[in-house]
Amino acid sequence: MKRQAKIIRSSDDGKRHIAIDGVNYQKILDFIFKDERHENKFIDVCNIILTGLRNPKLYDKENINAKCKNVTAMKFFKGQENARIYCQEVKQRGKIFVVVAAELLERKKIKRINRKK
């Protein structure tokens, strides 16, 4: 089943985009705009992605299992509430890079990710 996503931010050259999954769109936006702290952290993570930089403390690949590829996580306030937005990295037409924010986990309490979803 293909799902739709809405692009919310793009790089200046148009080769990198941040999108939010249509099914969880409102839930993720409500979390981001819950307060200024969350919004600022989200903007920081987006800037890292859109400029092509790597910062594993804010955005990094997640090793779930062999079937799940290109899964990453936006990390909010590690050591505190430890919220995550799990994302899927997709290449379109070989040149356009899209990060789709797909699933929100407001408090990550364990080291391993639940593989049942």
Image (cartoon, grey):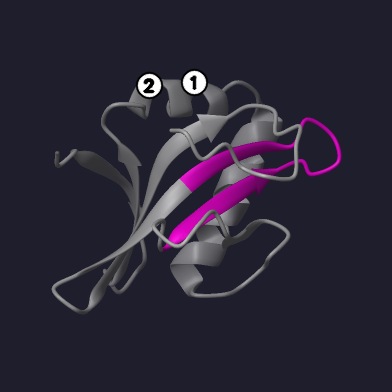
Direction from residue 64 to residue 103 in the image, left or right: left
Direction from residue 78 to residue 88 in the image, left or right: left
**Residue at coordinates 49% horizontally, 75% vertically from top-left?**
52
Vertical comparison of 113 with 29: above or below: below
Crowding at dot 1, Cα within 10 Å, few <14 / some 14-19 / many 20+, comes out as few
Crowding at dot 2, Cα within 10 Å, few <14 / some 14-19 / many 20+, comes out as few
Residue 88 placement: quadrant: bottom left
Vertical comparison of 8 with 83: above or below: below
Q: Could you tell me the amino acid type at mark 1?
A: Asp
Q: Could you tell me the amino acid type at mark 2?
A: Gln
Residue 50 placement: quadrant: bottom left
Direction from residue 78 to residue 16 in the image, left or right: left
Give x and y (percent) for residue 30.
49, 20
Pointer 1 residue: 30
- The numbered dot on residue 18 is none
**Residue at coordinates 56% horizontally, 65% vertically from top-left?**
48
Between 3 and 9, the one nearer to me in the picture: 3
Q: Given contact means CB atoms under 8 Å apart, are the residues at marks 1 and 2 in contact? A: yes
**Residue at coordinates 56% horizontally, 51% vertically from top-left?**
73
SS assignment at label 1 = helix
Pointer 2 residue: 26
Q: Is residue 84 magenta?
A: yes
Quarter of the image that includes the N terminus: top left
Looking at the image, the residue that sits furthest to the bottom is: 94
- Region of the chain picked out in magenta, as a range: 70-86
Marks 1 and 2 sit apart, C-alpha to C-alpha, by 6 Å
Between 14 and 88, the one nearer to me in the picture: 88
Quarter of the image that includes the C terminus: top left
**Residue at coordinates 61% horizontally, 73% vertically from top-left?**
54
Vertical comparison of 90 with 39: above or below: below
Looking at the image, the residue that sits furthest to the right is: 79
